[in-house]
Amino acid sequence: MINRYPLLSALVLSVILYSCSNFSYVTIPVLRPADITLPDHIQKLAVVNRSLPDDKNKAWNIIEGIITGEGIKADKIGSQMCIEGFRQTLMQSPRFQLVNSPINELHALGTGQMPPPLSWLQVESICQQSGADALVLLEVFDSDAQITTEAFEQQIKGPDGTMQKVPMFRANMRMVVKTAWRIYDPKTRRTWDEIRGDDFMNFTAEGSSPQVAINALIARREAINRTGRYAGGLYANRISPMWTNVSRGFYKKGNEALELAARKARTNDWKGAADIWKKEANNADPKIAGRAKYNMAVFCETEGRLDLAIEWARKSYTENNNKKARQYVSILTHQSNQNARAEEQMRSINGKE
């Protein structure tokens, strides 16, 4: 079994308190599975930028950059940032190791069209030189900016001290980057992933006129770079399990015992809190009992015991009609399925056959 909480002994579960709510919140680290599952023999990855134009397409890329206002080589730099976003995100992966490729760039079409697959001789050569089990290629990188403006009114204090409405304008730039990726496996000579995607980020600015607002926007090249980095990170998340945090609420009010248990939880005395919740689960008041059972479900989830957490949450709903527990059962069941997928994807790392 994978250790779902490898840092739990050193990491204090953070509790966010809301004084006007019945709930306190605890943040729990969970391993989110990848969207796709790669074979166990793939553990070391090399990544190469193949989205750059060859000699036939260089002239058109320069003209396109001038026409669109993005500048010469804007997409080239953006694609490099996309690779960097992929690398930085994948370095956080508990599943894969990133190795350096002997080459960083390959030239293909340099347009929005997917190029033919790289030859297996080239794939094998790159993987052999880098020690990689598979090669990740950014096959396409293309950007497009869409700018719109809208009018609104802003209240400001006038010279006489009264509030006045002033017409203003907001410019929005939606930067879209089109990417395509492939993962080449030289051992099986199979392409495990081939996907195209459009990712975007929005940038806004305000001004006294539409043009002033547009001029205040971030430079297109910087917008391309940021969106490219973002897109690269998204693809790394697609192919690798990643640690993330989920927030769970537990009842802190109901009676003195629940309030005491909440204080114990706030000081990270979860066992002491659980002892109280387990006792209050038999309270004659069904509302108190339901809340205590719900809290026991949260406690069990923090310990990684999802089957027991589901059992407690189900009891809270079926025996005490705690409607929030019904939703929590669905959340826990989904999380259990996610954990099973992540465990399968981590099989090679954890030594399971």
Image (tube, grey):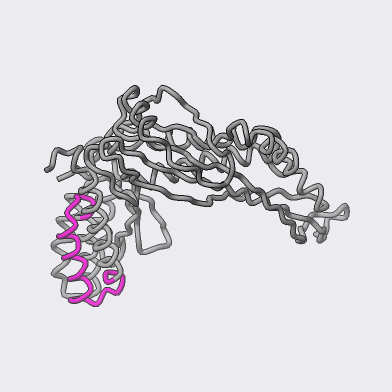
Q: Is residue 41 left or right of residue 103?
A: left
Seen from the viewer's position, the closer of residues 165 and 106 is 106
Vertical arrangement, residue 102 with respect to residue 228, above or below? above
Q: Residue at x 59, y 37 (%)?
A: 225
Q: Main secondary structure of the magenta part?
A: helix
Looking at the rendering, which quadrant does residue 125 occupy? top left
**Does the image show residue 27?**
no
Q: Is residue 121 left or right of residue 153?
A: left
**Does the image show residue 216?**
yes
Q: Residue at x 33, y 46 (%)?
A: 192
Q: The N terminus appears in which quarter of the rendering?
A: top left
The stretch in magenta equals: 301-326
Where in the figure is residue 122, as x and y percent of width and height?
Answer: 39, 30
Q: Residue at x 72, y 38 (%)?
A: 63
Q: The C terminus appears in which quarter of the rendering?
A: top left
Vertical arrangement, residue 283 with respect to residue 117, above or below? below
Where in the figure is residue 137, as x and y percent of width and height?
Answer: 43, 37
Q: Is residue 249 left or right of residue 60?
A: left
Q: Is residue 114 left or right of residue 37?
A: right
Looking at the rendering, which quadrant does residue 299 occupy? bottom left
| Residue 317 within the magenta-colored segment of the rendering | yes
Seen from the viewer's position, the closer of residues 319 and 193 is 193
Count of marks overlaid on the render: 0
Where in the figure is residue 302, as x and y percent of width and height?
Answer: 23, 51
Where in the figure is residue 15, as x and y percent of width and height?
Answer: 34, 49
